[in-house]
């Protein structure tokens, strides 16, 4: 099975899991990326069975709208029932690295507004300890040099992502070499540096259920 087929399988399994939760008053939070795109395309079959969706990126909002799914703001929606998104890495405690698609800040906001977070991955994303995938960090331009130095002091090597600004108009660093045995502590530490908009560790708001697609089908891991 190809990686794309695995992404579609994870999306289909998540859709089956959420189907009984749909109904009037239900608004979903929707992430960003190729796995989430598979989910949006599958979700289109159930439009009309829920009120709409809050998107974590312009790209996802456009895709939802193309399918005729109402796109709402967080002001309009109130608290979300469920947030569905992919990830770049997931550890056994369902802490994640996200932001490979540059949508980490809005993803963290929308995930934080949801009761439950379903994360969809193919098995290549599952790791024992986070950190092989470089950690994305969205920041205010002025802070670039001090942030690069602060990351170096933690053992990280930060490289600006070329040619990319986020939907919020900010640049990104991709950081290799950080120790992530305590992802919550690292997320908190980086969060409080001046100029950081958001870092791609999702450990404080980790996934509640991880849908992992592999060669023999989809397994669902619950948050321990
Ligand atoms: C976007 C993300 C994505 O969820 C992550 O990059 C995974 O993407 P894909 O499903 O395309 O592998 O965090 O900012």
Image (tube, rainbow, N blue to C red):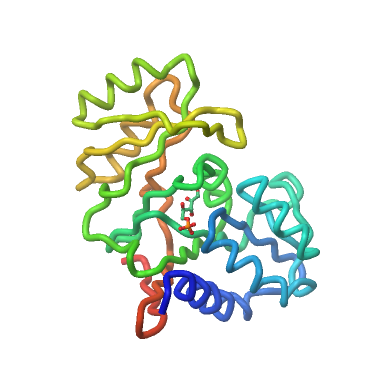
- Residue visible at 80% across and 72% down in the picture: 48
In the image shown, does 26 or 46 lie closer to the viewer?
A: 46
In the image shown, does 93 or 34 lie closer to the viewer?
A: 34
Q: Is residue 96 left or right of residue 71?
A: left
Rendered-image quadrant of the C terminus: bottom left
- Residue visible at 64% across and 65% down in the picture: 40
Q: Total of numbered circles in the picture?
A: 0
In the image shown, does 206 or 165 lie closer to the viewer?
A: 165
Residue 23, image quadrant: bottom right
Residue 66 coordinates in the image, percent (x, y):
77, 60
Residue 181 coordinates in the image, percent (x, y):
20, 47
Figure check: 66 above or below 163: below
- Residue visible at 54% across and 55% down in the picture: 33
- Residue visible at 40% across and 83% down in the picture: 217
Figure check: 97 above or below 224: above
Rendered-image quadrant of the N terminus: bottom left
Residue 165, image quadrant: top right
Residue 172 coordinates in the image, percent (x, y):
45, 32
């Amino acid at each position: 099975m190809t990686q794309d087929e695995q992404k579609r399988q994870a999306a289909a399994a998540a859709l089956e899991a959420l189907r009984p939760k749909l109904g009037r008053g239900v608004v979903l939070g929707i992430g960003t990326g190729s796995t989430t795109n598979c989910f949006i395309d599958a979700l289109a079959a159930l439009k009309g069975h829920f009120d709409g969706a809050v998107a974590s990126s312009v790209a996802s909002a456009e895709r939802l709208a193309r399918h005729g799914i109402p796109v709402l703001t967080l002001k309009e929606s109130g608290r979300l029932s469920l947030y569905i998104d992919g990830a770049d890495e997931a550890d056994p405690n369902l802490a994640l690295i996200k932001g490979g698609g540059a949508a980490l800040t809005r993803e963290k906001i929308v995930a934080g507004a949801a009761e439950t977070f379903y994360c969809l991955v193919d098995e290549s994303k599952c790791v024992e300890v986070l950190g092989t995938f470089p950690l994305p960090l969205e920041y205010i331009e002025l802070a670039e040099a001090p942030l690069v130095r602060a990351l170096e002091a933690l053992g990280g090597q930060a490289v600006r992502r070329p040619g990319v600004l986020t939907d919020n108009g900010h640049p990104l660093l991709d950081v290799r070499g950080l120790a992530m045995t305590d992802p919550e502590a690292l997320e908190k530490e980086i969060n409080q540096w001046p100029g950081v908009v958001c870092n791609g560790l999702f450990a404080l708001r980790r996934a509640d259920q991880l849908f992992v697609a592999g060669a023999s089908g989809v397994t669902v891991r619950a948050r321990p």
